[in-house]
Amino acid sequence: MSSSVPALEARNLVVAYDQRIAIDGMDLELPAGAFTVILGPNASGKSTALRALARVLKPAAGQVLFDGRALAEYGTKELARRMGLLPQDAIAPDGMRVADLISRGRYPHHTPLQRWTAADAVAVREAMTATRTAELSERAVDELSGGQRQRVWVALLLAQQAPVMLLDEPTTFLDIAHQFELLDLLRTLNGEGKTVIAVLHDLNQAARYADHLVLMKEGQVVATGSPAELMTADRIREVFGIDSVVISDPVTGTPLVVRR
């Protein structure tokens, strides 16, 4: 269940690549405990915004607050214990086993005097079970299919056990059955108390799973709110440039976008 207290907050955020401004003066609050999906057409700034919120990109101006504290003030391990990121371009070292990669999710919890513990083993085992990657544990990551690799990276994120999870297009490379399986898992984790923030492309998946949406276009936040509030034919035309009819999903009752 979402909270009125923001988990992450961007204030007048500006992000640039070389001389090109990708995000220009963004103000955004992402509620704690929510399942938030960021939507927008290609080159709208979705992934850039997520990377800035995760401190992968340094703002040219403005700031990001995490739990009311400037993101820049967090130590690396401290931040990793509280926030996990699954980027689009995650790459494992050549020849690394699946089990070893997933185990890296426990690194933020280690100290110079205390390395691997029973709690680490439990976290990794539970992450593998949730993502159905236990049977892949001895295989090299670079030998897996795209969909298998994506499940392994999600397992690493789960093993990290951070209360806030950011995922950049996590359904990439997954077939439709595994897309829904992953989104079901994220919704379950959200129901257990995790704040989930994801960039997605599919409007209907976003409407079905998210309780909070952020619509972006040309580096700006166009609107935020619930799927019921934002998934209208006028808003979809404004953001995505397509004519549609929005009906009620016969299974979930959530908005269902049908292109004219």
Image (cartoon, helix red, strand yellow):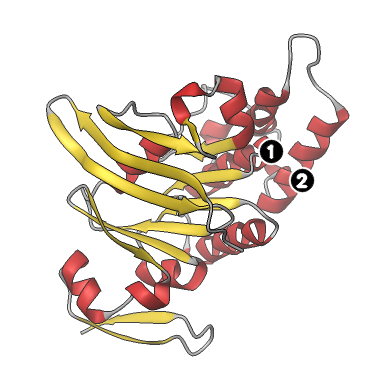
The residue that mark 2 highlights is 126
Q: Which residue is situated farthest in the left direction here?
A: 19
User: Residue 96, located in which quarter of the rendered image?
Assistant: top right
Residue 196, position as x, y percentages in the image: 54, 52
Q: Amino acid at mark 2?
A: Glu
Label 2, secondary structure: give it: helix
User: Residue 224, located in which quarter of the rendered image?
Assistant: bottom left
Compare marks 2 and 1 and give the one earlier in the sequence.
2
Q: Amino acid at mark 1?
A: Ala
Residue 227, position as x, y percentages in the image: 41, 72
Q: Say left or right for 137 vs 86.
A: right
- Residue drawn 25% across and 33% down? 15
The residue that mark 1 highlights is 159
Label 1, secondary structure: give it: helix
Q: Say left or right for 45 vs 171.
A: left
- Residue drawn 43% across and 66% down? 206
- Residue drawn 82% across and 38% down? 122
- Residue drawn 37% across and 76% down? 229
Q: Are marks 2 and 1 in contact (CB under 8 Å)?
A: yes
Residue 79, position as x, y percentages in the image: 57, 28
Camera-side residue of 98 and 218: 218
Q: Say left or right for 167 vs 223.
A: right
Residue 90, position as x, y percentages in the image: 46, 33
Disc 2 packing (10 Å; few <14; some 14–19; many ≥20): some
Camera-side residue of 49 and 151: 49
